[in-house]
Amino acid sequence: MENIISHFEKYLSLNDGEIQALMSRITERRIKRRQFLLQEGDICKSFTYVQSGCFKMYGVDNKGVEHNLAFAVENDWISDIGSLHKEQPSKLFIEAIEPSVVLEISKGDLWYLYTNYPKFDRNFRVIIEDKYIELQDRLLQTVSATALERYESFVDQYPHLANRLPSTQIASYLGVTPEFLSKIKNDRFKK
């Protein structure tokens, strides 16, 4: 639990009462590789902190092709915010790429923390704002950058993931085929 406390301390430090309130509202889960935190059609019920492991969030198109939207590793958060807040069925999947340990905070417990401990309202707002900025940057790259530029940006942003993820997952995230990603990597290596 020290990881999540340290994570919050980056924003606003927590006193003993706030730490105790957080700990009483967190559920730890062990997740197996290829196990889902969320499946399309389910309603997202919690905001999830990755203590260890790796997850992907993706959608599947009409042809059955996966499109990775995000990855989350240690000390990161993952959730379908739209489904969580609107209590509507998700259009996304959140799946473990590796065996993982997560800490989950249900929507009700999150609201309790927001209401009774204002620092959590601020901390989560900054976390969500950071995720929104990340999403904006990714969307802009998708429409304006070449595949090579998107790959280089991915490596810069997630240097720890470039060698940790299978090429098929990275290719899906970049919107290219695994074969084209291999060509990009080879061309980049030759330079």
Image (cartoon, rainbow, N blue to C red):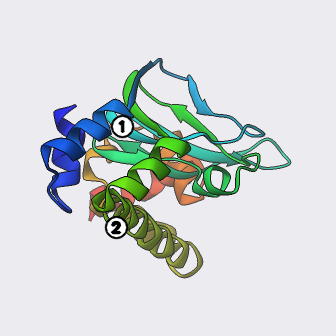
Give how far across and how far down residue 71 sits, in percent: 45, 47
Q: Amino acid at mark 2?
A: Val
Q: Amino acid at mark 1?
A: Val
Could you say which is closer to the camera, residue 78 or residue 159?
78
Q: Residues within 10 Å of mark 1 (few under 14, many from 20)?
A: many
Could you say which is closer to the camera, residue 99 or residue 179?
99
Residue drawn at point x = 79 percent, y = 41 percent: 64
Could you say which is closer to the camera, residue 141 or residue 122?
122
> With respect to residue 11, does 57 lie above or below?
above
Q: Residues within 10 Å of mark 2 (few under 14, many from 20)?
A: few
Q: Earlier in the sequence, mark 1 or mark 2?
A: 1
Residue pointed to by mark 2: 126
Query: In the rendered image, which quarter is residue 155 located in?
Result: bottom left
Screen quadrant of the C terminus:
bottom left
- Which secondary structure lies at badge 1? strand
- Which secondary structure lies at badge 2? helix
Residue drawn at point x = 67 percent, y = 51 percent: 83
> With respect to residue 78, does 98 lie above or below?
above
Residue drawn at point x = 23 percent, y = 52 percent: 8
- Look at the image and tell me whether residue 69 can be seen: yes
Residue pointed to by mark 1: 50
Screen quadrant of the N terminus:
top left
